[in-house]
Amino acid sequence: MITFENVVKTYPDGTRAVDDVSLECTGGRITVFVGPSGCGKTTSLRMINRSIEPSSGRVLLNGKDVREESLTDLRRGIGYVIQSAGLFPHRTVIDNITTVPRLLGTPRKQARSRAGDLMELVGLAPVLANRYPYQLSGGQQQRVGVARALAADPPVLLMDEPFAAVDPVVRHDLQQEFLRVQRELAKTIVFVTHDIDEAVLLGDKIAIFQQGGTLAQFDTPQALLTTPANDFVASFLGAGRGLRSLQFVGVGDLKLDTFDVVAESELADTDGWTLVVDDQRRPRGWVNRGTGPNHPADPIELETTNLRQALDRALLSPAKRVPVCDADGRVLGTLGIGEIVTAMDAG
């Protein structure tokens, strides 16, 4: 657990970067610091590992003031990932990952074995182990950066806009991989971003900072989206906050239609858009007798899909509906844009 108690950071020229911030980052969870440029989020992050010292107040790690521990011991327990990955250009991938364990005295063979496991964990192919950073894509470099930060198995991980420098498709993949890794490892993570969508996707709790280094609101993503504390928070969340809130509502309680689901043998008796299923009730595609061949169906799973995902799939479907399946991929019914909008209004 990381605790900020009335933390202030003022620079010699009088600039106050962080102003009386108090919050608690729960152990084993992801806390996201988000806000506009110059609002103090990165300064706050860097006070955790004492890259920056507070002017007043305290930062506590598991109840102990970080200034009471030697800097070396403190940083041994904290992994750090930055936007550009910060890899050593003259060292291979595997040697980059083993840097900290080797400095701590871990035998080379053991450190390299651990590095191989971490490469697999973060989605890096073994063939990349002996390549140099310049031979990797931006997304691969960021994965190496995450693996290196995890190499000494630190309980705390600080991440300063780690995915900001990659393109949107790679960024999405990195975010999903990051969430998967966190489900396995349950580290205490503080993550800085300027992107509210990334904050809502990744954060168990979100701290929204505003200009002047003050904390505007600290809450769960759902609470922020539904009950912003003030006009600044509402403005920062943007006009799309209602749409973002859909990701916290599952489709499990919605009523599904089955009238448009037919077996291939019954297709001749149908009209309009129809979802064709095989003899195991698995979706084969959407068919409309007036439009020619099948159109692919992109199903969702009943228990694991939220309304935002369902709406995305329905909007992209030629039928403006989405097949809803059980965990074995069998169609239970379909859900259309109308039903989703009704559920939104009811919420």
Image (cartoon, rainbow, N blue to C red):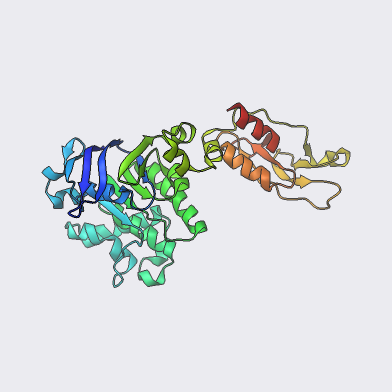
Which residue, as the protein is rendered here, is positioned at the far front?
Answer: 14
**Residue drawn at (49%, 32%) of the image:** 226
Whether residue 311 sits left or right of residue 178 in the image: it is: right
* Of the pair 12 and 140, the residue shown nearer to us: 12
Which residue, as the protein is rendered here, is positioned at the far right?
Answer: 269
Residue 37: percent from left, percent from top = 37, 53
Which quadrant of the structure image shows residue 282?
top right
Number of marks in the rendered image: 0
For the N terminus, the image quarter is top left
Q: Is residue 147 above or below residue 345?
A: below
Residue 174: percent from left, percent from top = 45, 54
Residue 152: percent from left, percent from top = 25, 52
* Of the pair 178 and 8, the residue shown nearer to us: 8
Whether residue 166 sits left or right of residue 55 in the image: it is: right
Which quadrant of the structure image shows residue 128?
bottom left
Residue 153 appears in the picture as rendered: no
Whether residue 268 sits left or right of residue 213 in the image: it is: right
Residue 184: percent from left, percent from top = 38, 43
Q: Is residue 214 above or below residue 71?
A: above
* Of the pair 316 and 137, the residue shown nearer to us: 316
Residue 103 appears in the picture as rendered: yes
**Residue drawn at (56%, 40%) of the image:** 243
Which quadrant of the structure image shows residue 104?
bottom left
Q: Is residue 312 above or below residue 333?
A: below
Whether residue 324 sits left or right of residue 191 in the image: it is: right
For the C terminus, the image quarter is top right
